[in-house]
Image (cartoon, rainbow, N blue to C red):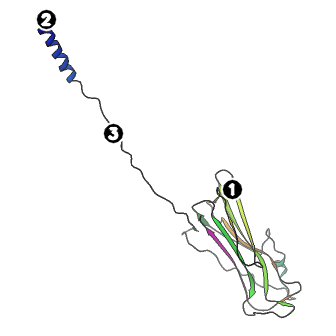
Amino acid sequence: MQRLFAVAAASGLLLAASAVPAAAQSTTGTIVINGSVSARCGTTPGNGSTFGETVGLGELANANGLLETALSGSSAVAPAFSRSYSLTCTGSNFGVSIEAQTLGNTTVATAPAGYTRAAEFTGRVSLDLVSPAAGTSTLNLDDSSSVAGATTASAGPSNFLANSTANLRASAYGFATPTGAIMVAGPYQGRIIITVSPT
């Protein structure tokens, strides 16, 4: 009788154990989202690839034919002109170059002794920068039209172009002609060529 009771009790325990639900089980999935941003520089708005305009300096010579004193007396602080543009660059350490090209008479190829058909000057580009660690700063880069080729620089590994309007400024100053030379009459043209490139 005791044996029968023991078997019955064991059977009851088995039935009770089988009635307990299994522990809940979860599963986790991970979805990875990828993308990229290309290194690029452009104008705003529109992300254009060119910028610029024509600047009229008016009369280049004084009444005596010599270079206008407002041009010869211009400086980096008080340039003959300055223009502002808005650009964006997606990365840091972008490259910049500037080339100033002589302001020359477009109709006279050669000037006689005592005259000149050209005025040299310095072109400047100024860019507003921002750095996570150092904050804001300005990169100034100058190029003389009397020296062939462009002057180049980079913003620096931690420097980005500031996300603001008019963050690039172009100017010209220090116009000069040979001492005592009379400027030949006619139209004159020069250029400042600025390139901003991603790295």
Camera-side mark, 2 or 3: 2
The percent position of residue 50, horizontal first and vertical second, equals 59, 74
Instruction: Please state, as top left, top right, bottom left or bottom right, where the N terminus lies in the image.
Output: top left
Where on the picture, by quarter, is residue 128?
A: bottom right
Sequence-first disc among 2 and 3: 2
Q: Residue furthest front?
A: 3
Identify the element where label 1 is drawn.
strand
What residue do we see at 89% from left, 86% from top? 180
Residue placed under numbered mark 2 in the picture: 2
- Asked if marks 1 and 2 touch (Cβ < 8 Å), the reply is no
Position in image of residue 68 (x %, y %): 83, 82
Vertical order, 14 against 171 (above or below)? above
Residue at 84%, 91% in the rendered image: 115
Looking at this view, is 4 or 74 the one in front?
4
> Which disc, if any, is residue 136?
1
- Earlier residue among tags 1 and 2: 2
The x and y percentages for residue 104 are 75, 86
Q: What is the C-alpha distance between the residues marked 2 and 3?
A: 48 Å
Which amino acid type is shown beneath numbered disc 1? Thr
Q: Which residue is mark 3?
A: 27
C-alpha separation, residue under disc 3 versus residue under disc 1: 49 Å
Q: Which residues are magenta?
A: 187-197
Residue 3 shown left or right of residue 121 in the figure? left
Q: Residues within 10 Å of mark 2 (few under 14, many from 20)?
A: few
Closer-to-camera residue (79/193): 193
Which badge, 3 or 1, is on the more N-terminal residue?
A: 3
- Tell me whether circle 3 and circle 1 mark residues in contact (CB < 8 Å): no
**Residue displayed at 83% across by 78% down:** 72
Q: Main secondary structure of the magenta part?
A: strand
Q: Nearer the viewer, mark 3 or mark 1?
A: 3
Residue type of the residue flagged with mark 2: Gln
